[in-house]
Image (cartoon, coloured by chain):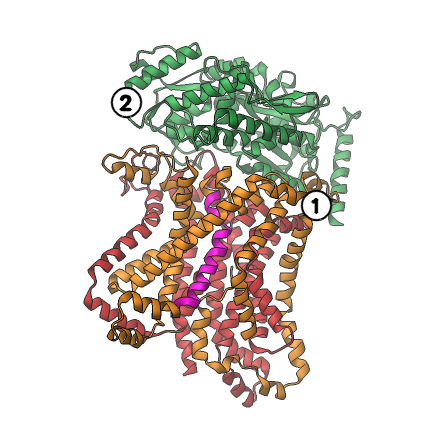
Chain colours: A orange, B red, C green
Amino acid sequence: MYAVDSPTTPAHRAPVGPGANEPAPRRRKRRGKGDDVVLPWVLSGPALLLLAILLAYPVGRMLVLSFQKFELKELWTGATPKWVGFDNYTAVLSDSAFWSVVQRTVLFTAASVVLTVLLGLGVALLMRRVGRVVRMAMIIAMMFVWALPALVQAQVFKMMTDSDVGVLNYLIDKLPGVEFQNHSWFYTPTQGWIVITSCVVWAGIPFLAITLNAGLTQVPKELMEAATVDGANGWQSFRNITLPILKPLLVIVTTLSVIWNFGLFTQNWVMRDGKPEPEFQTLATYSYVQAFGQNKYGLGSAIAVLTVILLLGAMAVYIRQMFKIGEVD
Amino acid sequence: MAVVTATAPRRRKPNPAADGTMTVGRTRTGNLVANAAGVIFSIVMFFPVYWVLITSFKPQTEWSSFDPTFIPDAPTLDNFKSAFNAPLFKQSLVNGIVITAVAVLAALVVGFLAALAVARFRFYGRRAIILVVLAVQLVPFIALLIPIFLMLQKAELTGSSIVGVTLVYVVLLLPYTVWTLRGFIAGIPRELDEAAMIDGCTRGQVFWRIILPLTGPGLVATSVYGFIQAWNEFIIINTLNDPEHQNLMAWLMQNQTSRGTYWGPLMAGAIITSIPVVIFFLAVQRNIASGLTAGAVKG
Amino acid sequence: MKRKFAVAAALAATLVGTAACGGNSDDSSTSANGAVDGKGKTIKVWLMVDAQSGWKDVVDDASKRFTTATGANVTVEYQQWANVLTKLDASLAGTDVPDVVELGNTQFPKYVDAGAFGELDKKSFENSDTWLPGLSGACEADGKTYCVPYYAGARVLIYRKDLFEKAGVTTAPKTYDEFLADADKVAAGNKDSKFGAIYMPGRYWYAAMSWVKANGGDIAKKDGDKWAGALSSPESQAGLQKWVDLVKKYSKADVTKDESDQYLVFSQGNAGAFYGNGWEQGSAEEVRKDPNDPASALVPTKVKGKLAAAPMPGIPSLLGGSNVGVPLKSKNADLAAQWIKYFTDSTSMKGLVKASALPNATALLDAAASDNPKLAVGAEAAKNSWAVPASGKWADVEKANILQNMLSDILTGKKSLADATTAADEQIAKTLNG
């Protein structure tokens, strides 16, 4: 879904060499100039058209909607929606429920991304220290987790933490002196979010670990050896050699994790049976419920617009990076 | 989500030397603590997957029991039968296959052309296109669901029509498709094109004889990724279409909320639904391997 | 263009159809009588999953009789309670609408209010003069009828006869205090930490509100033309407190769950009693081998043969149930009305009674109780029942989970009972007056 330059770029650029990014002046000399002006636009035309209809137009429509009162009546009768100025925005921004949703979404994103990246990196490093068989086992386990659809991942976590038939309560209850039968994991928001975060982190580790492990193969062995000879300990060589090499990759996977986790929908939606309590709402579910549950399409759009703005703010660094990519290419 | 993103490129640029030596060295040392940690990690990671598997083989008395069994006492295939016979299962399966196949194919054709343009041509607006492709992924698609719903609703492409949702999926897959294929095309040395042209090939012939065959593995990887994306999607289709015109994933979601949760049949359904994804996941690994040999042309 | 044409065509069809029936030319209500030639046509029916799991044979039989009479075919799509309203909203906006829609009696007023359903000729449906008021009330507006009652359910006390007897309780409790005393005895005899004398999940608002009603409280009251939440009134709070005390003292149920799977959990044998629909007794005692196949064999559970039901003493039941109506935009309104006629006639009702659902008319209640002894208690409870506030916006209160969230807040200690009810009152007033 996200066409971000994950390890693709560093990996394939290297063998192609510097020549790859050169424009093709020679060819232009040989071919008619007009050809190179029209043909590329013809080729990219269908893609641009589709993006315009189903991305650009909806973005515009969403902005317009956020300034309108669009509810069930407008939907059913096709009546022209009324302009309400900033009413939707004032309604949203003055609602304390919205701010707690924002706070929750940001907190969850921060916690889950930090955990996923740290654990992913840890596993990637671990993979380079274990034997061939164990590494194979790790890869197989991760591949299965990775291959599982998000919906199924959420459902199995819901089942395992069920207060009645859940295996987690059963296991914890087996510990001496711990009474955990019928424990409800969604009784307090904190515990509920621990379950949701665990699910997201568990599901996110394979991508991180396998990607970063691939990145680690790029660390020149000679460099590490030289460092050891020079008396650097493990931490020092990690900090001064491995980390700088991994950095571009880390930036990308972190960014991707932020984008994905900020838009959390499936996990909290599924674990709360499609009707999350206020304390289990995230921005994505909140906007969805306002629009499709409460039929307040205008209000829902306002929330969606605010969500996008927040995400863009958080992604400022990444956007800069993106423009750089656009420039280099 | 970005399933293939990582695997594909990793295999594209092999580094057997670094990989091999390091592994061998470590194995011989045999770091016990690390190996133990690796084993524990594997077990913890795999446990939920294992739980899906065994639950699907448990009869109702077992999966609804407060004292779960770790190996089914009386394994049964009833849950799978139940899922297969469940209302709308077969229909959702067919819908899912049709929608996914059409969306992936369309995204591939349209995306490939655009990728060719940005990878092989220098033209005014090229950078803008690249930026657009990169930028659209910053907009969470769920946010766009409201206007898209209203728009397709008006065009009568929702409800009992699968046209609307298929179009949405094409657009969903497009940015990734363009970007990845661009990378694969750019990876083919220009010298090959030029040499062919000097030998008298037309631009069309260069496309058919050089670019298309050499991007083959890329096309496979991209389409597999697209397949997984479209197959796993359930929020959009659940919002746009009625139950008779949804895919298997949406069917699975709905099955959960009906009158309590029947975990056994649900997990059996989950397995059936996941099987194509898992198979394709393994398939992509093989194809990427063949992509490596194709890359040997570079020599 | 296409859309306009379709609407016009639908309108024309309705007009022509009505004219053809005659009989009720003075208004535009659709009659279910008269001959309609439906050859080559197919009507789309939305029923809730309960019909699929409980009485699919009744649906199939009604459809068969309908097809024989009219020549038209029927496709039945079974819907989930969780998202049926969202789905309906979406499809009503288009032109491809279902021809018959089932909705809960608490949900119907909203759609009748919004003009989503077409008027029906009440007289053309069997037993229409004795329809249960709790159901038909949702169908009527300004003296016109927009839907047909389909079935009802009343909530009763379902308990473990064996455990009650073991605790020295041989007759069903007659008063609320007796009920609590019995619960104490059952609890005293079962010290297992998993065991709860009463299974009462925390988000079970139908139950909580029944306790409120029992104490003279109310969910909301209409004052002039404005609604005001009434949950923070002293009576309501006292009733709610009683319910909360009951949950805290006797229930081991997950307070973050609702009642949707209570019979499944109860069938594990870890509770003494639960408050449920009459048919849930059967569901707790026996399960289908294949839950997706209503024809598959019944498998006894741990509590098979150990259950009995009684009216919950001192607690009036919410009369739950469903109605069926014909959306205004349906292109086959006449056929749809005919299908409803077969689906709600006495023959179909007999089938429902066999499946332990209460029939749609008081005239049938007593016969139902004698035909199916399991229904006797429910039929009794149905006579002492209450209904949700009669507002077109009530469905939005349900959709926003206001009551469930209030109960969670109270039981998890996030808010005090007084604070939670005050907050809920505000939300309810805002929704109902919105």
Up-down relation of residue A326 to residue B159 (above or below): below
Which picture quadrant has residue B299?
A: bottom left
B79 drawn magenta: no
- Which secondary structure, mark 2? loop
Read off the residue under disc 1.
A68
Along the viewing direction, whichever of B54 and C364 lies nearer the viewer: B54
Q: Which residues are magenta?
A: A245-269
Let me know if residue A159 appears in the view: yes
Up-down relation of residue B183 to residue C276 (above or below): below
Along the viewing direction, whichever of C253 and A34 lies nearer the viewer: C253
Q: Inspect the image, locate mark 2, and give the three-letter code of the amino acid beneath it.
A: Lys
* Image x and y of residue C212, in percent: 52, 19
Up-down relation of residue C215 to residue B16 (above or below): above
Up-down relation of residue B79 to residue C295 (above or below): below
* Image x and y of residue A292, in percent: 60, 42
Report the magenta stretch's main SS: helix
Q: Residue at x 44, y 12 (%)?
A: C176
Read off the residue under disc 2.
C191
Look at discs 1 and 2 and give the one toward the viewer.
Answer: 1
